[in-house]
Image (cartoon, rainbow, N blue to C red):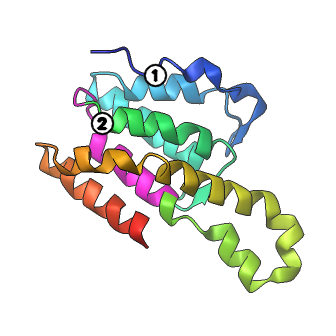
Amino acid sequence: MATPLTTLDDVPWHEIKDSSGSAAAIPDLLTAIASDDLATARDALRRLRERICQYGFVVEQATAATVPFLWELARRPEVTCRPQIIQLLSCVVAARQWEDMAAAYPKLLHYTDDYVGWEQEARAAVRAHRDLLPCLLGDPDPEVVRAAEELATALAA
């Protein structure tokens, strides 16, 4: 099987931000998620979620750049926390914190403009890989299938 995450170095992680500041730690977290140790993978996924989709609904600048790697990990049977990765993708699709705020308070739009753009870019990144959904929906792991069904529903909304 091919080595996962071979294009991580193609992203300028030091130049983009996550909820903690610099997104430079994201490659290490993604690599840890690919670990065959369940505790290591889940801890890394929890920490990544805090950085790119904090509270399950606040996306960051680094979210869109991270999404393709999440899709890659979600489709690899050897990755131990695939349902949770797919659930994270669902959260990214559903995130509209800043768009909703900008719609409710148009005078704040100039303050939220970057954040609204990040939400839109993150959703577009998830949608760009939706052709992988049929593979996940046909997975032998029922938890993966259930999470993929939730993602399909979120993508359809």
Mark 2 burial class by Cα count in 10 Å: few <14, some 14-19, many 20+? some
State the image coordinates of residue 100 (x, y, percent, origin top left): 66, 77
Residue identified by numbered label 2: 75
Q: Amino acid at mark 1?
A: Leu
Q: Is residue 29 left or right of residue 149?
A: right
Is residue 91 part of the magenta span, yes or no? yes
Residue 48 position (above or below residue 118): above
Q: How many marks?
A: 2
Task: Name the residue at 71% across, 26% down.
Answer: 12
Spatial CA span between label 1 and label 2: 12 Å
Q: Main secondary structure of the magenta part?
A: helix
State the image coordinates of residue 7 (x, y, percent, origin top left): 54, 20
Residue identified by numbered label 1: 5
State the image coordinates of residue 108 (x, y, percent, origin top left): 85, 75
Q: State which quadrant residue 65 falls in.
A: top right
In the picture, the quarter occupied by the N terminus is: top left
Q: Nearer the viewer, residue 45 or 6?
A: 6
Task: Name the residue at 24% across, 46% down.
Answer: 136
- In the picture, the disc for residue 110 is none
Mark 1 burial class by Cα count in 10 Å: few <14, some 14-19, many 20+? some
Q: Which residues are magenta?
A: 77-92
Callout 1 secondary element: loop
Q: Nearer the viewer, residue 35 or 95?
A: 95
Tell which circle, 1 or 2, labels the residue nearer the N-terminal end.
Answer: 1
Residue occupying the far bottom of the picture: 104
